[in-house]
Image (cartoon, helix red, strand yellow):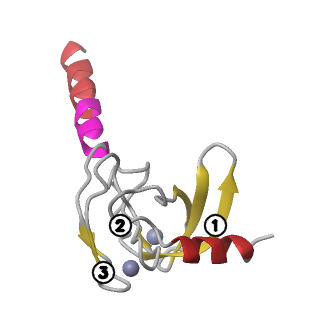
Amino acid sequence: MLSFLASVLENKMENKRFTKNDNGFICENCGFIVEPLGYSSRNHCPKCLCSKHVDIMPGDRQNSCGGVMDAIKVELDSKKGYVILHKCRKCGEIKRNKASTEAKNQPDDIKKIIKLTAGSL
Ligand SMILES: [Zn+2]
Ligand SMILES: [Zn+2]
């Protein structure tokens, strides 16, 4: 029983380390080289706003789908700021991701964000 608990704990710690992962990636939609954000894990391209379906919980990289996710809509949240709705081309799942318009390095394309916000009701 104790060893079971220990392994659960270990798993939790491992997941935590995973959540903090902040690697750069190459956008599968437009080929833009996305640099790490520096303070949290970036999950979408600042240029075309596309994401990749790799997370179950934000940042965990535990989803095996791997489909490209298009930004279909942007909502303005009073607390979080701009929230991008991503839809997976492969499985159709919709996810919400906070936009990174405030990032010092490669901020999200604000013109695209505003356009997607205007398109929503
Ligand atoms: Zn892109
Ligand atoms: Zn998917």
Give yes or no for residue 72 being in the magenta stretch.
no
Q: Which residue is mark 1?
A: 74
Relative to 41, is 1 above or below? Answer: above
The number of discs equals 3
Question: Which kind of residue does numbered mark 3 sit on?
Answer: Phe
Q: Earlier in the sequence, mark 2 or mark 1?
A: 1
Q: Quadrant of ligand 1?
A: bottom left
**Residue drawn 54% across the image and 70% down it:** 110
Q: Residues within 10 Å of mark 2 (few under 14, many from 20)?
A: some
Horizontal and vertical percent for residue 58? 42, 50
Horizontal and vertical percent for residue 59? 36, 51
Res. 10 image quadrant: top left
Q: Which residue is mark 3?
A: 32
Q: Which residues are magenta?
A: 12-19
Farthest residue to the top: give it: 2
Say left or right for 93 vs 38: right
Say left or right for 118 vs 109: right
- Of the residues tagged 2 and 3, which is closer to the observer? 2
Tell me, yes or no, whether the two marked residues, 3 and 1, touch with CB atoms within 8 Å.
no
Q: Which secondary structure lies at badge 1?
A: strand
- Quadrant of the snapshot with the N terminus: top left
Asked whether mark 1 and ligand 1 are closer than 8 Å, the reply comes as no
